[in-house]
Image (cartoon, rainbow, N blue to C red):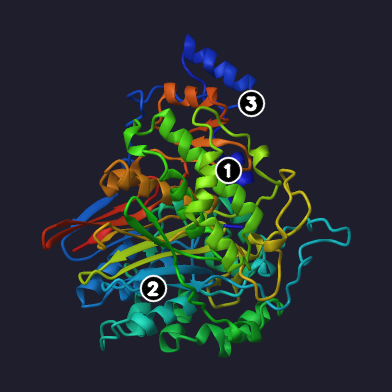
């Protein structure tokens, strides 16, 4: 499901970190005997003021500008946005162009076979959202991934192959944004011009032109998933072009079938949902996704979740995303503490963050699903509910997760991408997009080049039954035709106390998305960090289940030790606590400066002008 939830996080954590001799070795031994990972070796000051260092790889992680800026997980996408902005396009045009570019160069994270969300805000303060989340097809049903005994089928059909896919929504979402907000400048920012930014990275235009250069992350993902990719000839043809082997880092890679499909979409924005492409999707998926499913797919435009935090206004995504609700909930809880008075990254600061996270994720598991009611959303995001939750936090002791409610957990995958864009007028767009786990379903539709999502795994396959961790999954997120699965994607826009645009932020990371966005905002608002430092700062993550606190590198030995002594089960050295992409706007009278930053945990590069 967006997977890395409880299981994947636990499996991917680096486990116990052995320390040097003396007291550090004793701490490590105690950690091992208690089943906890040892705290890290010393990284600097007692309060862990270090940042997560950018790799020495030549990537430019932060840029500034006076007019417009974009931050994405791929240089190609950020440059596409910059080019569109330079031609007179607005933030929404730039987001569309960047989305098509990133969908080609990061197929392990997103694509036109997936979906996503957009949160937008016009310069006049009007704000809204677009829900392009994938949808369960008509052929699905509550027990579709279970055998006759009610057990999950062993071949993982919700993860691998065509039956893992929901009806894609990304192209419909982008076209809806174009229709509503695009400038449509002839020859510059018409729909066909914006789609072209994806085409040029997919097509072959000669020996040295077209395509894109494969980066290490994609190469590693293709190598790791080669066995699954090989199961489907249509997929192997695209992603295993060298006698069954994938392209390697540094190689120029082409997706000519996808280029042809994108040309069809450039000519007809509804091409994916009708005609030959729809018929091919129906044929290739064995009528799992039908032409009727595609023709009836429509984006939704729910009102955004709006909260306040120390005079700032937070605008984020409502259900089927849980991100906005629980971001606001955690901020409401933390607002009752003077966080800025605590040493940043000290034990008091991180303890309160963890306890707010724990409570929000317990509520998420119990109450949130694809059909969450407005009453539940209103209650969870209210100041009153936060005050009740805050009153149950012991500032010196960790709460046991068992004390907070029934054992319900929703898992998600972490292969997602985010784009943040601000234009010279003050329009802002924040969009998180996904195909769920790395390379989605691993299934390419015929000769279309479309790699389908595996978003059906975001549903609870066994409502009412224990999952891998012995946790009962929620009926509210059971498979149901036409339902959109719960998500953690948290595209967010931050407004300062004067009503001005302050920042645009979001991240991939599955269940870790919400806590990533939370900590970026806290770092900016409570600790006054510029956005590049707010993004690069060490982070933590707690999601209620499993009862574990993941801690980024850069947090010191004394702090980790104190957190452990307070009752937290500390796991140190988790490498993938989000990959934020953010743009901050700073004001000096009538002048403004834009700072765009890409998380050093990833390989993104921003652009500005």
Vertical arrangement, residue 515 with respect to residue 556, above or below? below
Q: How far is disc 1 from disc 2 in space, using C-alphas?
A: 32 Å
Are dots 1 and 2 in contact, CB under 8 Å?
A: no
Name the residue carrying label 2: 198
Which residue lies at the image location 34% right of the left edge and 30% below the top edge? 343
Answer with mark 2 or mark 3, whichever residue precedes in sequence. Answer: 3
Compared across the picture, whether 538 is left or right of 83 comes to: right
Number of the front mark, 1 or 2: 1
Vertical arrangement, residue 53 with respect to residue 418, above or below? above
Name the residue carrying label 3: 35
Answer with mark 1 or mark 2, whichever residue precedes in sequence. Answer: 1
Q: Position of residue 544 (x, y in %)?
A: 60, 43
Give me the disc on residue 317: none
Q: Residues within 10 Å of mark 3 (few under 14, many from 20)?
A: some
Name the residue carrying label 1: 9
Q: Quadrant of the C terminus?
A: bottom left
Q: Position of residue 174 (x, y in %)?
A: 43, 76
Are dots 2 and 3 in contact, CB under 8 Å?
A: no
Q: Kindly tell me whether residue 590 is visible in this rendering.
A: yes
Q: How many marks?
A: 3
Number of the front mark, 2 or 3: 3
Q: How far is disc 2 from disc 3 in space, using C-alphas?
A: 48 Å
Q: Quadrant of the N terminus?
A: bottom right
Q: What element does badge 3 sit on?
A: loop
């Amino acid at each position: 499901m967006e997977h890395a939830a409880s299981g994947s996080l636990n499996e991917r954590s680096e486990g116990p970190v052995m320390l040097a001799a003396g007291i550090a070795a004793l701490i490590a031994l105690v950690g091992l005997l208690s089943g906890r990972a040892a705290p890290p070796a010393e990284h600097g000051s007692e309060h862990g003021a270090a940042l997560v260092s950018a790799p020495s790889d030549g990537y430019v992680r932060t840029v500034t500008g006076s007019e417009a800026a974009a931050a994405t997980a791929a240089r190609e996408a950020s440059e596409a946005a910059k080019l569109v902005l330079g031609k007179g396009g607005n933030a929404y045009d730039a987001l569309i162009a960047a989305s098509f570019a990133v969908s080609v160069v990061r197929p392990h994270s997103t694509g036109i076979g997936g979906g996503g969300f957009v949160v937008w805000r016009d310069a006049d303060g009007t704000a809204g959202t677009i829900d392009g989340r994938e949808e369960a097809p008509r052929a699905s049903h509550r027990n579709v991934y279970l055998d006759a005994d009610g057990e999950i089928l062993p071949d993982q059909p919700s993860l691998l192959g065509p039956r893992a896919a929901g009806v894609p929504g990304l192209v419909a979402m982008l076209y809806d944004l174009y229709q509503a907000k695009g400038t449509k400048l002839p020859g510059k920012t018409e729909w066909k011009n914006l789609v072209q930014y994806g085409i040029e990275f997919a097509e072959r235009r000669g020996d040295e032109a077209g395509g894109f250069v494969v980066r290490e992350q994609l190469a590693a993902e293709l190598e790791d998933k080669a066995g699954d990719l090989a199961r489907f000839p249509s997929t192997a043809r695209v992603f295993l072009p060298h006698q069954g082997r994938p392209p390697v880092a540094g190689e120029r890679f082409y997706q000519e079938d996808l280029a042809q499909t994108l040309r069809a979409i450039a000519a007809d924005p509804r091409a994916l949902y009708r005609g030959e492409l729809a018929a091919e999707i129906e044929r290739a998926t064995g009528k799992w996704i039908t032409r009727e499913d595609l023709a009836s797919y429509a984006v939704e435009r729910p009102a955004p979740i709006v909260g306040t935090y120390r005079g700032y206004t937070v605008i984020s995504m409502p259900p089927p995303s849980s991100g906005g609700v629980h971001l606001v909930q955690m901020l409401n809880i933390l607002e009752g503490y003077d966080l800025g008075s605590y040493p940043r990254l000290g034990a008091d600061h991180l303890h309160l963050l963890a306890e707010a996270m724990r409570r929000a994720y317990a509520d998420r598991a119990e109450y949130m699903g694809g059909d969450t009611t407005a009453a539940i959303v209103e209650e969870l995001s209210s100041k009153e509910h936060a005050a009740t939750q805050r009153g149950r936090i012991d500032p010196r002791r960790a709460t046991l997760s068992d004390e907070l409610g029934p054992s319900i957990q929703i898992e998600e995958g972490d292969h997602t991408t985010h784009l943040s864009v601000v234009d010279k007028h003050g329009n802002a767009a924040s969009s998180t997009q996904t195909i769920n786990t790395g390379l989605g379903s691993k299934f390419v539709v015929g000769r279309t080049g479309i790699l389908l999502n595996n978003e059906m795994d975001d549903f609870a396959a066994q409502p009412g039954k224990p999952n891998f961790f012995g946790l009962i999954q929620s009926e509210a997120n059971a498979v149901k035709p036409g339902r959109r699965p719960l998500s953690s994607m948290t595209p967010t826009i931050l407004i300062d106390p004067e009503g001005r645009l302050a920042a645009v932020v979001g991240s991939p990371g599955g269940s870790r998305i919400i806590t990533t966005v939370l900590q970026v905002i806290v770092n900016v608002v409570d600790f006054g960090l510029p956005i590049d430092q707010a993004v690069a700062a060490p982070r933590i993550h707690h999601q209620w289940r499993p009862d574990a606190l993941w801690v980024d590198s850069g947090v010191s030995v004394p702090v980790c030790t104190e957190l452990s002594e307070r009752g937290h089960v500390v796991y140190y050295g988790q490498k993938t606590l989000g990959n934020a992409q953010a743009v901050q706007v700073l004001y000096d009278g009538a002048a403004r400066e834009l700072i765009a930053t890409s998380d050093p945990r990833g390989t993104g590069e921003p652009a500005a002008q």
